[in-house]
Image (cartoon, rainbow, N blue to C red):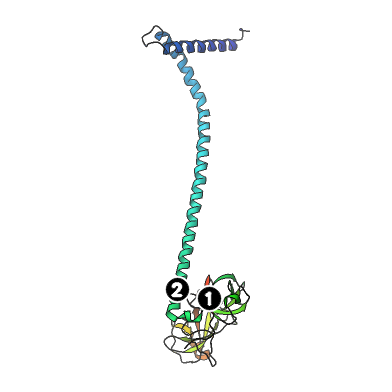
Amino acid sequence: MLNDPFRRRRVVLALLVGVSLVLLTASFGSADSGPLRPVRNVVMTVLGPIEEGASAVLKPVRDLFGWFGSTLDAKGDAKRFKKERDELRRQIVDGKAALAENDRLRRLVGLSRRLGLSDYRPVSATVIGRSPTVWFATVQIDHGSDDGVRVNQPVIDGDGVVGTISAVTPGTAVVTLITDRESGVSVRVIGPGDEGTVVAADGTPGMLSMELLSRRSGVRVGDPIVTAGTRSGPLATLFPPNLPVGFVSRIDPDRLQTDGVVEVRPQADLNHLDEVVVLTRSTWRQ
């Protein structure tokens, strides 16, 4: 059995390891100058290369376990960082939404105080639906007849005129915007004082045209347009006077002379309505 050279080498190596363990154990209990010191030095000299070789062989295994540990720690950190990032993003979005809402409310309060709109029993509402087409411009709000909302009542936001109530249920209502082709608002131009009617612009969704009564108007680009507040006659209106409607955005001299028409851009951002106010009082003071 011991004739196998590989087996003999393993036996010799085992004996050497065993002897070295015995000698090392004994040497730890003896002084550095004891009789076993030379033997211990010989053993360390013989086994040193073996220990270094074993350490070199086992290093990839230790590195592999270290890599797994580092990877698991990195994944845990990545999940934590992602959670913190998502939370920060949510806080930023919430903050921006709160700032936008505060800005809308501030503009609305300013308009209400400036024009005395509290006399018209305003009812605040949130837009919950929008028209799927550009030519029939309507939105749905979350207040209805149970809140005093009725057909034909004016609707505004913090920037100006939005439209009128065209349909009502107990809990909701439909607002037809001033850019709808079925809409029309009696207005006047601040400055020249010309009066006319604002309607949806032909071929330009989202824009308005003001049909002037006077073909010799001194109107200019940038002039503000407000509600006329006329209660009778051809320009009778549902809106209280002086509500912002828009401003003159373009004048075609030929069309102004022939048709008395100028282009008007709405003051309110009708494409991004969130909060509106319904003026539920049916009459007002001039």
Q: In terms of secondary structure, where does tag 2 sit? A: helix
What is the total number of numbered labels drawn onto the structure image? Answer: 2
Quarter residue 126 falls in: bottom right
Q: Residue at x 50, y 46 (%)?
A: 80
Circle 2: residue type: Arg
Residue that appears at 47% across and 64% down: 98
Tell which tag, 1 or 2, sits nearer the viewer. Answer: 1
* Residue 159, image x, y percentages: 47, 75
Q: Give percent across and percent down for residue 29.
A: 41, 12
Front residue of 57/28: it is 28
Q: Which mark is residue 92?
A: none
Query: Which residue does the numbered mark 1 point to in the structure image?
Result: 123
N-terminal-most mark, 1 or 2 = 2
Q: Quadrant of the N terminus?
A: top right
Q: Which residue is mark 2?
A: 107
How much space separates mark 1 and mark 2, taking CA atoms? 16 Å
Q: Residues within 10 Å of mark 1 (few under 14, many from 20)?
A: some
